[in-house]
């Protein structure tokens, strides 16, 4: 069964259409770092025991340091940023919601499922009670400058901001401001399912109530704590991603594509026909992301190394 909303990562569909095995495909349909953080040895107790409060506190403390979180804000740990996106309506007051689009479709879907009227026109036609921005935006990499507002709940999804974009975390202690972080993208461990909300104590209380106890696994807490305590890996990774993004841009522009935007984890291009380009790549077992409402767009994540770049160049030659 295909998901109701289109996302990257649906490699099963590509294999069903074009054959091959998962190991033989180059999946560039997501913005996940292909060179993931090295997983440390995991004590068996992380798998057999319920995680204790000390494990959550250790990860919260590491997050505070890594993201320079204000003392007055709290860190809510969740099983992925998607779980937090689905929980955001629990924080919102009655009234219209504005999502700065086009962007990741789960934000609007979560509020519509909760009965809210959602608008994505720019500028909004009515004054929203809740405003959602993705910073940097997925899929075009737009950056947003937002500040707290006393009567508008502002939710900033910074799932891709760890590549080096300026963060809005400094505003997170405001009662009407929430910053979301994803662990899976920059650290390349999406299967770990780990996400964070940085917000006021009252919003944190509501989110923890919504998520329930043990909102992250023992292995996720251990790996997340070590990764967020390793700024040298993060800095080296930013340099590598920037370099690889530049190489990918050169390969794509040589094939006739035009750069629209993106981040150093994914790139967005204008091509003559996005679906035709996706199919051409798929015949070489390279999977990409296209958009129904923008048939001239195609988005590619980064390959892990030079051999991936060569595969793309051969497929488009």
Image (cartoon, rainbow, N blue to C red):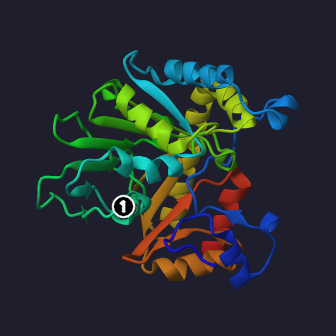
Q: Quadrant of residue 215?
A: top right
Q: Position of residue 275 (x, y in %)?
A: 50, 80
Image position of 189 with respect to 259: above or below: above
The reply, left or right, for residue 97 in relation to residue 48 is left
Q: Is residue 25 left or right of residue 234?
A: right
Q: Is residue 217 above or below residue 202?
A: below
Q: Residue at x 64, y 37 (%)?
A: 214
Residue at the spot 37% in from the left edge and 18% down from the top edge = 72
Q: Residue furthest left?
A: 126
Task: Tell me which residue sits at (22%, 33%) in the image.
Answer: 148
Across and down, in percent, residue 236 comes to 62, 29
Which of the two residues, 249 or 211, is positioned nearer the viewer here? 211
In the rendered image, which quarter is residue 271 located in? bottom left
Q: Position of residue 52 (x, y in %)?
A: 70, 25
Q: Nearer the viewer, residue 85 or 7?
A: 85
Label 1 residue SS: loop
Residue occupying the point 42% across, 55% down? 138
Residue farthest along the right direction in this orientation:
44
Q: Quadrant of the N terminus?
A: bottom right
Report whether residue 33 is seen. Answer: yes
Number of marks in the rendered image:
1
- Up the image or down, 310 lies above or below 46; here it is below
- Is residue 41 visible to us here? no
Residue on which the image places disc 1: 114
Left or right? Give the position of 109 relative to 30.
Answer: left
Pick the quarter of the image with the C terminus: bottom right
x and y percentages locating residue 239 in the rendered image: 56, 34
Tag 1: Cα neighbours inside 10 Å, few (<14), some, or many (≥20)? Answer: few
């Amino acid at each position: 069964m295909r998901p109701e909303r289109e996302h990257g990562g649906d490699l099963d569909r590509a294999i069903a259409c074009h054959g091959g095995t998962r190991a033989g495909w180059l999946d560039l349909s997501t913005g996940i770092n292909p060179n993931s953080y090295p997983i440390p040895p995991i004590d068996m107790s992380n798998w057999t025991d319920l995680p204790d409060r000390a494990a959550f506190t250790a990860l919260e403390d590491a997050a505070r340091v890594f993201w320079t979180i204000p003392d007055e804000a709290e860190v809510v740990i969740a099983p992925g940023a998607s779980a937090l996106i689905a929980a955001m309506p629990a924080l919102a007051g009655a009234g219209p919601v504005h999502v700065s689009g086009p962007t990741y479709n789960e934000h609007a879907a979560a509020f519509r499922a909760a009965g809210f009227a959602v608008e994505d026109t720019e500028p909004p036609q009515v004054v929203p009670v809740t405003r959602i921005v993705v910073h940097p935006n997925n899929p075009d990499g737009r950056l947003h400058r937002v500040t707290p507002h006393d009567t508008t709940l502002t939710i900033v999804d910074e799932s891709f901001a760890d590549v080096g974009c300026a963060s809005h975390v400094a505003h997170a202690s405001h009662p009407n401001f929430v910053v979301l972080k994803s662990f899976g993208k920059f650290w390349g461990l999406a299967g770990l399912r780990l996400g964070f909300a940085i917000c006021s104590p009252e919003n944190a209380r509501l989110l923890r109530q919504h998520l329930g106890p043990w909102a992250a696994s023992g292995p996720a807490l251990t790996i997340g704590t070590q990764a967020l305590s390793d700024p040298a890996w993060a800095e080296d990774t930013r340099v590598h991603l920037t370099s690889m993004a530049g190489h990918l841009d050169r390969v794509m522009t040589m094939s006739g594509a035009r750069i629209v935007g993106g981040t150093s984890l994914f790139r967005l291009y204008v091509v003559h026909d996005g679906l035709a380009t996706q199919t051409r790549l798929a015949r070489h077992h390279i999977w990409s992301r296209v958009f129904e409402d923008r048939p001239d767009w195609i988005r590619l994540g980064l390959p892990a190394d030079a051999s991936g770049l060569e595969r793309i160049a051969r497929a488009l030659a």
